[in-house]
Image (tube, rainbow, N blue to C red):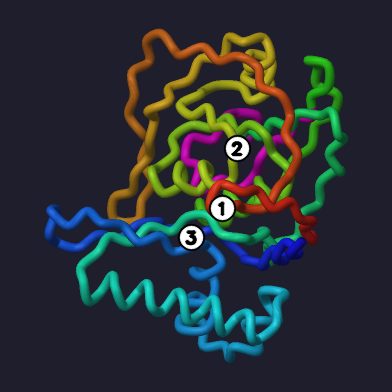
Amino acid sequence: MPRKPLCRNIHSYPDFWSFSPDDPGRTETIILSLDEYETIRLIDYGGLTQEQCGGRMGVARTTVTAIYDSARKKLSKVIVEGKRLQIAGGNYQIISKFSININKKGSNVMRIAVAYENGQIFQHFGRTEQFKIYDVEDGKIVSEQILSANGIGHGALAGLLKMADTDVLICGGIGMGARTAMAETGIKIYPGAQGNADSAAEAFLAGNLSYDPDAECGHRNGEEHQCGHEHGEGHQCGHMHGKGHQCGHEHGEEHRCEHHN
């Protein structure tokens, strides 16, 4: 029986997940896996050698060569043939350059993260500097902790939450790139929530959190402004059970691996 391939280390989710040619009629899509993306980021963008890239990704240089060659062939087809590019999946695990100081999650615990600022739900996910983490067991909050995020950008924030074994994110506005990153992590999001963070966590557990699944945020000339959404009746959410931490998957198969803080 062949051995499962080792998970490749990537250090952040992308901030941009898809690219399209000017011609809207060209809809054929090429999928660039996240480990392929990482070789392009480290070698072509970062200027590392293949051997250095292998050291960062935790694999042999020969493995890097194979991944990198596959990525370059895909990119050449995108450019020459005018295909759409989408980044998704792959055999990887997140290894963040940012240290995580957070309690280990128990096996029967659901972990909720709330974008946090001064006791309130922060309204711009990509600039979140703190998350308040709630560990839930048997339907009750058993511990709370503040996780520093430093507003490092939505791709890195998604990776941070994945490394923290988060199951649920409650936040304010969240853009499409961040939604794509969160979908890749498997973390369930409840955007468009407002008000006190503690109250939102309790409301989620009670099944009556008011949120707006369509709430987004945008920028104008680099300045933050609030997302717009109706403040009428919110959507009601229910419970979800905790999930184990896993690395990304490829072709529908999950590859469980350990991550390093």
N-terminal of the pair, mark 3 or mark 1, is 3
Q: Which mark is residue 151?
A: 1
Q: Quadrant of the N terminus?
A: bottom right
Residue 45 magenta-highlighted: no
Image position, residue 68 (x, y; %): 51, 79
Image position, residue 208 (x, y; %): 58, 9
Q: Amino acid at mark 2?
A: Ile
Residue 124 magenta-highlighted: yes
Dot 3 crowding, Cα within 10 Å, few <14, some 14–19, many 20+: many
N-terminal of the pair, mark 1 or mark 2, is 1
The span shown in magenta is 115-135
Q: Amino acid at mark 1?
A: Gly
Q: Which residue is mark 2?
A: 187
Image position, residue 251 (x, y; %): 53, 52
Give the residue at x 46% y 14%.
Answer: 235
Q: Which mark is residue 14?
A: 3
Q: Amino acid at mark 3?
A: Pro
Quarter holding residue 86: bottom left
From mark 1 to mark 2, how far is it between C-alphas?
Answer: 19 Å
Q: Label 1's element?
A: loop
Q: Eyeballing the image, is 173 above or below 184?
A: above
Toward the viewer: 17 or 232? Answer: 17
Dot 2 crowding, Cα within 10 Å, few <14, some 14–19, many 20+: many
Residue 249 visible? The answer is yes
